[in-house]
Image: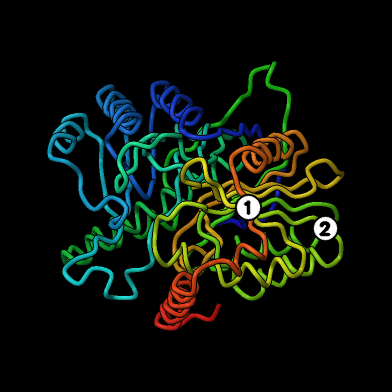
Amino acid sequence: MRNHSVLRDGHQIKLLKGGGEFFPELIRALDAARAHVQLETYIFDFHGDGARVAAALERAGSRGVRVWVVVDGVGTPKLSEDWRVRFDKAGVDWRVYSPLGTLGLLIPNRWRRLHRKLCVIDGRLAFCGGINILDDMHDPQYGALKSPRLDYAVCAKGALVQQVQEATQQLWWRMKAVRNARQQNFSEAFSAFRAASLHLPWRHDVHFAQDETRVARAGFLLRDNLRHRGQIEKAYRRAIGLARHEILIANAYFLPGRKLRQALIHAACRGVRVRLLLQGRYEYFMQYHAARPVYRQLMQAGVEIYEYAESFLHAKVAVIDANHDRPWATVGSSNLDPFSLLLAREANVVVADAEFAKSLKEGLEKAINFESQRIMPQTLLERSPFQRAMDWVAFALMRFAIWLTGNRY
């Protein structure tokens, strides 16, 4: 696979905020598909907008479009019987990445999850971001939400569409090769592995309409456990190191490693305004509590920390120097925590375009100014001894989990 870290000109990138913008765009693209659809997601939930996406996949399969869907074995362990029958009838091919099996997550190797959210249609259009196939007003654990979760995705045309296609095809064929090998069907396993290596098939030339003139520089970044182990984190660190004016990061599960933490501290110390928009609602014990011990170190360097209070924050985005001559932004699936940066399969799009960066910044600043609460040093001191103890317990458990995987962070 080619180097995904290079930014190329000639892309058309559309920023999509939340499911309210993402799902209509995705469904329109699915209904226009002519040849093939490949979709990957961590969670596929069949409520509301999730059911509408499933119906669009069903329609595509029924009219002869080849549809491949991959979901994660933790995020989506099984398909309901009703939808399994409907997908089978329509010819929608469905696979579960790394099913948990008997011992589940007690085996550290099974912490390596498929967390990326990608869709490529006819080799001409790609979607990438943090939005699961999950209705914005519904949560599988907490039920109906009063406000939609905050999240982002992009819709893209241009060279990175082929890169997304290659990534999704490789995973599909590798999963098929592993499945055939376990069934001792070695000839089929070899054929599937060879297909993964050759990036087969489906490539279509894309011709933009005359009125589609605005283009942007963009690139596609992967994180996996083979060739792209540190690509997303390195892109963050490089962009932070080059920042001269402002850094704005929104991240759902935030526990950066030493190098990334130091990059943020050094930026703040040299006069760059650094703002972090983080999860304010309790969702998971480790992710919620383990982040708090790093707050004080960052705030001592001048980093501003805000916690989103309106609903659940699920975004994994950043924007740097949006109003200056070297704008940089990223939208994707990667959290800034060890599970994303060391273990999971992730995908981000990086965009170097002033209008895109300004649009993302505007949305994040609105969330900071009207839907969030700033965390001050005094706020940390006022936490009860029990809460602070839970913070350090979660932090220690996270460090222990990293040690179990054999990684340093």
Q: Is residue 366 left or right of residue 314?
A: right
Which image quadrant for residue 386? bottom left
Q: Position of residue 37 (x, y in %)?
A: 38, 35
Q: Is residue 265 left or right of residue 312?
A: right
Q: Position of residue 365 (x, y in %)?
A: 69, 40
Nearer mark to the viewer, of 1 and 2: 1
Q: Is residue 105 left or right of residue 287?
A: left
**Quadrant of the snapshot with the C terminus:** bottom right
Provide the residue designation for mark 2.
Answer: 272
Which image quadrant for residue 177? bottom left
Q: Is residue 172 left or right of residue 246?
A: left
Please tell me which residue lies in front, 13 or 386. 386
Q: Position of residue 223 (x, y in %)?
A: 52, 61
- Say which residue appears at 23% left-offset and 66% top-offset: 181
Colour scheme of the rendered structure: rainbow
Provide the residue designation for mark 1.
Answer: 306
- Say which residue appears at 38% left-offset and 37% top-offset: 145
- Say which residue appears at 48% left-offset and 26% top-offset: 25
Q: Is residue 87 above or below residue 271?
A: above
Which image quadrant for residue 266? bottom right
- Say which residue appears at 65% left-offset and 52% top-offset: 374
Local crowd at mark 2 within 10 Å, few (<14), some, or many (≥20)?
A: many
Q: Position of residue 123 (x, y in %)?
A: 49, 35
Amino acid under disc 2: Val
Sooner in the amino-acid sequence: mark 1 or mark 2: 2
**Quadrant of the snapshot with the N terminus:** bottom right
Amino acid under disc 1: Tyr
Please tell me which residue lies in front, 342 or 320. 320
Q: Secondary structure at mark 1?
A: strand
